[in-house]
Image: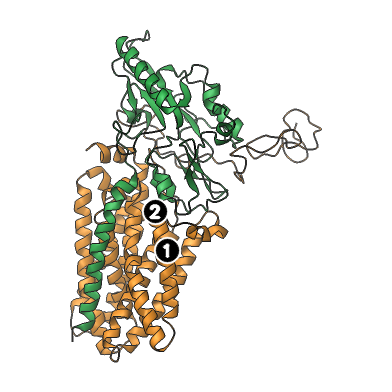
Chain colours: A green, B orange
């Protein structure tokens, strides 16, 4: 089981991951527009944007900060390759599969662009490209993994904010890092989605994060749940309603 | 300097083969397009959603509980064929159920049986056409039947619609074969009328997810009202119109009841239910309720002129359509609102 550990305290917002991802995967650009939102001119993950660096400007100090009442939060966002993936469970064609590395992969030669995965992702990662017709997202560099190489983003990260490796080892590393940061007085440091216990809704993320503020500040959902966990219950309510429909129709017909 | 083809060459102005402007800038004489995103077709540079609308413009600071107000989820990519299918599929399923049940009084309800079977068969064809129309890669529609995946309501629904389509078409045959097929279509028509509610509940969209218990009843009740309304419009015998009236009254009552239950379930988190009060979806929701109440009033009156009966049918149909479009647009609005996503998970 392979995955990413993204330590946001090490991110310097250089966007090398975004560039490396675009270049290796030969993804088209998204236009060169300015958003006016800090240094974030990417905005969101999308069909042709598989890494996105978020920039949060906070009017509060960090204990390591020398800038007074100001601090940065930067985070390189990516598909989480959830242990219980909403997109995979929703996919009606079987185009979305779990690879031998434990990652979630959309097969472009199977996807028929139904768009259900787009609404089923609790992180808003997957998107359908309208001029292509299919859904796309991070593949965790499936081609590189098969050749025993590190994914392009992790390979290019100059500060090791993005770490790739075996999930068991990454979790140990991440917990040690949180302890170290707490020791230095950065008590708000915490892990996001590192295990099924901490994020039961998704069964844990294969790409988890170390954050220093509420998840929603980074545009991450605070308690994501794979849709099937809730939607499953609606089959029962449908069953009850169908009994009602059958009864109502029969009653209308047989009443003299 | 601008060259003849209206481009700025990257380096060499006399380059006869400038790189294609697909946002990749890879000269295929020098580089191979073999990356995992290389197959992504580009007609024009996509600024990426949610850039289409830039809803956060003017909110240049990150607020307490969102990232510059940027949506946390992706809005549904479905277009008008999907909510229209929700109506047509419900109507077709309900018609098959009614024409199967009507076999109990076969002699007196021949016109209703014939009409019901025709609506079911035509509805199945129209449903398939609407669903295929909305696919990103239409020629791959059959891939829906590559697998059987119970975790995906869309996959289950495609199997239901396929079984329904086959039996509803066979039900057009005369005699015992037609009757047997009609019964089969009636059985398949039940889940066809309701699975679409499960389909919406099985998403990360706050409005749809939070309404998980009530979306299927709303869709099923609306299917009953849709069929009854269609039968009220059609010229049938007085006995058949009495059946239609009974079904219309109970169906429309059930519909209004299910709507109230849905509203109450959504009220638990005010922000999540907001799209049913505001904007396009809110207006459609109000229109739906008004149409349904007016249509119920028309149907309740026992002896009435034909125009009033038809009026009830038309209003009932309009109400059913507005319900589907309201919930569809409401879900889109709900996915756009990052606060709704957060509050649905924290409160």
Q: Name the residue under label 2.
A: B152
Q: Is mark 2 on a helix, strand or loop?
A: loop
Q: Is mark 1 on a helix, strand or loop?
A: helix
Question: For residue B80, which numbered disc appears in the image?
Answer: none
In the drawing, does residue B108 fall left or right of residue A132? left
In the drawing, does residue B117 fall left or right of residue B41? left
Q: Which of marks 2 and 1 is nearer the N terminus?
A: 2
- Place of residue A77 in the rendered image (x, y in percent of width and height, measured from the top left): 44, 30
Identified at 21% across, 64% down, the residue is B256
Chain bearing tag 1 is: B
Question: For residue B159, which numbered disc appears in the image?
Answer: 1
Locate the C terminus of chain A by quadrant.
bottom left
- Place of residue B233 in the rendered image (x, y in percent of width and height, measured from the top left): 33, 80
Return the residue nearer the eye: A152 or B272.
A152
- Place of residue B162 in the rendered image (x, y in percent of width and height, measured from the top left): 44, 67
Are the residues flagged by discs 2 and 1 from a single subunit? yes
Identified at 31% across, 17% down, the residue is A60
Chain bearing tag 2 is: B
Identified at 32% across, 38% down, the residue is A224
Q: In this view, does A69 lie above or below A164?
A: above
State whether residue A61 appears in this view: no
- Place of residue B57 in the rendered image (x, y in percent of width and height, measured from the top left): 41, 34
Return the residue nearer the eye: A164 or A219.
A164
Q: Quadrant of residue B214?
A: bottom left
Return the residue nearer the eye: B63 or A172.
A172
Q: In this view, does A104 lie above or below B177?
A: above
Q: Quadrant of residue B224?
A: bottom left
Q: Distance between the residues labelled 2 and 1?
A: 11 Å
Q: Quadrant of residue B123?
A: bottom left
Locate the N terminus of chain A by quadrant.
top left
Mark 2 packing: few (<14 Cα in 10 Å), some, or many (20+)?
many
Mark 1 packing: few (<14 Cα in 10 Å), some, or many (20+)?
some
């Amino acid at each position: 089981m392979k995955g990413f550990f993204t330590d946001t305290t090490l991110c310097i917002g250089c966007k090398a991951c975004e560039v490396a991802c675009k270049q290796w995967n030969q993804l088209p650009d998204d236009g060169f527009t300015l958003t006016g939102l800090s240094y974030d001119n990417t905005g969101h993950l999308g069909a042709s944007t598989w890494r996105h660096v978020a920039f949060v400007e906070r009017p509060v100090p960090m204990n390591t900060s020398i800038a007074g009442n100001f601090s940065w939060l930067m985070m390189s966002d990516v598909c989480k390759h959830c242990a219980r993936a909403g997109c995979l469970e929703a996919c009606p064609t079987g185009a979305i599969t779990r690879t031998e590395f434990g990652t979630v992969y959309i097969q472009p030669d199977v996807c028929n662009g139904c768009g259900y995965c787009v609404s089923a992702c609790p992180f808003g990662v997957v998107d359908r490209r309208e001029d292509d017709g299919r859904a796309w997202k991070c593949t965790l560099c499936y081609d590189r993994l098969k050749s025993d190489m590190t994914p392009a983003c992790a390979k290019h990260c100059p500060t090791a904010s993005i770490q790739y490796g075996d999930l068991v080892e990454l979790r140990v590393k991440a917990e040690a890092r949180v302890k170290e940061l707490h020791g230095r007085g950065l008590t708000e440091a915490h892990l996001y989605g590192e295990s099924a216990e901490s994020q039961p809704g998704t069964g844990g993320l294969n790409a988890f994060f170390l954050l220093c503020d509420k998840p929603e500040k980074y545009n991450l959902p605070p308690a994501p749940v794979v849709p099937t966990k809730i939607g499953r219950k609606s089959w029962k309510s449908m069953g009850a309603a169908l009994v009602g429909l059958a009864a109502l129709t029969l009653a209308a017909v047989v009443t003299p | 300097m601008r060259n003849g083809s209206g481009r700025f060459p990257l380096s060499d102005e006399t380059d006869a083969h400038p790189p294609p402007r697909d946002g990749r800038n890879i000269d295929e004489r020098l580089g191979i397009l073999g990356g995992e995103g290389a197959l992504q077709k580009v007609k024009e540079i996509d600024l990426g959603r949610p850039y289409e609308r830039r809803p956060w413009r003017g909110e240049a600071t990150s607020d307490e509980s969102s990232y510059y107000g940027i949506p946390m989820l992706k809005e549904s990519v479905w277009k008008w064929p999907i909510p229209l299918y929700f109506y047509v599929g419900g109507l077709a399923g309900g018609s098959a159920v009614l024409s199967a049940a009507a076999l109990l009084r076969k002699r007196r309800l021949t016109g209703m049986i014939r009409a019901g079977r025709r609506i079911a068969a035509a509805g199945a064809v129209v449903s398939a056409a609407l669903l295929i129309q909305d696919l990103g890669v239409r020629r791959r529609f059959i891939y829906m039947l590559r697998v059987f995946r119970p975790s995906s309501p869309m996959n289950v629904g495609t199997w239901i619609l396929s079984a329904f389509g086959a039996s509803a078409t066979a039900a057009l045959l005369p005699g015992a074969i037609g009757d047997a097929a009609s019964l089969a279509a009636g059985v398949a028509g039940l889940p066809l009328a309701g699975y679409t509610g499960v389909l919406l509940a099985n998403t990360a969209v706050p409005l749809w997810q939070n309404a998980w218990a009530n979306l299927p009843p709303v869709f099923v009740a609306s299917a009953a009202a849709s069929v009854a309304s269609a039968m009220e419009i059609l010229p049938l015998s007085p006995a058949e119109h009495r059946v239609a009236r009974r079904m219309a009254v109970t169906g429309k009552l059930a519909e209004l009841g299910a709507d109230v239950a849905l509203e109450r379930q959504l009220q638990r988190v005010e922000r999540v239910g907001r799209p049913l009060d505001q904007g396009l979806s809110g207006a459609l929701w109000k229109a739906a309720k008004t149409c349904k109440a007016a249509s119920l009033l028309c149907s309740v009156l026992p002896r009435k002129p034909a125009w009033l009966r038809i009026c009830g049918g038309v209003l009932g149909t309009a109400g059913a359509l507005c319900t589907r479009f309201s919930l569809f647009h409401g879900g889109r609005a709900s996915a756009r609102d990052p606060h709704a996503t957060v509050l649905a998970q924290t409160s």
